[in-house]
Image (cartoon, helix red, strand yellow):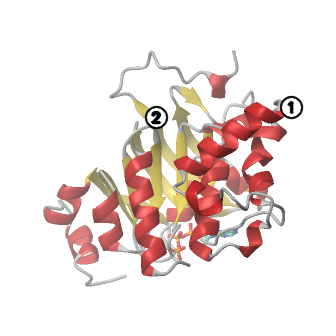
């Protein structure tokens, strides 16, 4: 059995989906974050907040090793996905990123039809018969609350959709390969308030079956959508650190650290 395919339903519900232990992350020789330890709880939403440059995206992208596509990176520490170290040399990166999907700040549909966007990842992993592919595409679009808006135009280009629809299409594309975890990097920052509200409603529905980690600059969004919040900041050397992690209500109402309080109350960052 492959390490990234070992997530099983027999795991107790309170076991973390991801367990990060003493993570430090380097771009080349430059350390971006240091000594991060935290658990990502299953079927919960975890928000990552903090001032610009504190390493939120770096941390998020370390969780499915997508940062390695961009540049040369190095990692110290471990990240376990249902108990398996994702930085083990035996890990198949395609399978890992299928299990831990990602949605980016700017919607990035492929220049192809709506149907083909959603089917893309499924086809990469096999050659399902058309009828079952149709079912997967429909289920993913329904899961992303987009089906009713696009069901009569599945053959049309995804680039003709609005920004909010494109972002939900990207979520559908991620859902189609049945991930366990969805990483969202400021998924609403390019969207208007109505489209943002739809994504937030969607997150609320998806959390029933999916573990979600969301980076956001919007404090209200973090407090609305998340169960847990991690506050990151930088030390005097500009290296990102985890300052405080806990239930969202605690981080916003009774943070243990003064730095957290100052940030969530808008006094810096
Ligand atoms: N591809 C990269 N190559 C080199 N350094 C990088 C790269 N990406 C990020 N960094 C550096 O790592 C540090 C953390 O950046 P990161 O983007 O993770 O922060 P962030 O908290 O997500 O910021 P923002 O809120 O502005 O998006 C910064 O000093 C940044 O310059």
Answer yes or no: disc 1 within 8 Å of ligand 1.
Answer: no
Q: Nearer the viewer, residue 137 or 177?
A: 137
Residue 216 position, x and y percent, is: 44, 68
In the rendered image, which quarter is residue 103 located in? bottom right
Mark 1, secondary structure of its residue: loop
Picture layout, residue 244 above or below residue 40: below
In the rendered image, which quarter is residue 230 located in? bottom left
State the residue position of label 1: 127
Asked if the residue under mark 1 is in contact with the one under mark 2, i.e. CB atoms within 8 Å, the reply is: no
Q: Residue at x 74, y 57 (%)?
A: 154
Nearest to the eye among marks 2 and 1: give it: 1
Residue density around tag 2, few if under 14, some if 14–19, many if 20 or more, within 10 Å: many
Residue 103 in sight? no
Picture layout, residue 20 above or below residue 82: below
State the residue position of label 2: 17
Answer yes or no: disc 2 within 8 Å of ligand 1.
Answer: no
Q: Is residue 54 left or right of residue 268?
A: right
Residue 153 position, x and y percent, is: 73, 62
Mark nearer the N terminus (2 vs 1): 2
Residue 221 position, x and y percent, is: 35, 68
**Please, which residue is most extreme toward the left here?**
254
Q: Is residue 227 left or right of residue 236?
A: left
């Amino acid at each position: 059995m492959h390490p990234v395919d070992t997530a099983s339903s027999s795991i107790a519900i309170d076991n973390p989906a991801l367990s990060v232990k003493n993570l430090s992350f380097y771009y080349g020789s430059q350390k971006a974050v240091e000594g991060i330890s935290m658990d990502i709880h299953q079927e919960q939403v975890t928000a990552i907040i903090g001032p610009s440059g504190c390493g939120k995206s770096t941390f998020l992208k370390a969780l499915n090793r997508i940062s390695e596509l961009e540049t040369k990176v190095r990692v110290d520490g471990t990240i376990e996905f249902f108990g398996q170290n994702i930085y083990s040399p035996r890990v198949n990166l395609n399978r890992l990123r299928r299990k831990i999907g990602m949605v980016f700040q700017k919607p990035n549909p492929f220049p192809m039809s709506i149907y083909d966007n959603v089917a893309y990842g499924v086809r990469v992993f096999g050659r399902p018969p058309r009828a079952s592919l149709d079912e997967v595409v429909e289920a993913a679009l329904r899961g992303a609350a987009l089906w009713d808006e696009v069901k009569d135009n599945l053959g049309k280009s995804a680039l003709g959709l609005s920004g909010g629809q494109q972002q939900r299409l990207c979520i559908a594309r991620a859902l189609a390969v049945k991930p366990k975890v969805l990483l969202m990097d400021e998924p609403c920052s390019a969207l208007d308030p109505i489209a943002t509200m739809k994504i937030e409603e969607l997150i609320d529905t998806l959390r029933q079956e999916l573990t979600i980690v969301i980076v956001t600059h919007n404090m209200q969004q973090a407090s609305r959508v998340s169960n847990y919040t991690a506050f990151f900041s930088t030390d005097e050397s500009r290296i990102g650190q985890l300052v405080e992690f806990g239930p969202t209500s605690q981080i916003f109402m009774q943070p243990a650290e003064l730095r957290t309080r100052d940030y969530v109350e808008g006094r810096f960052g």
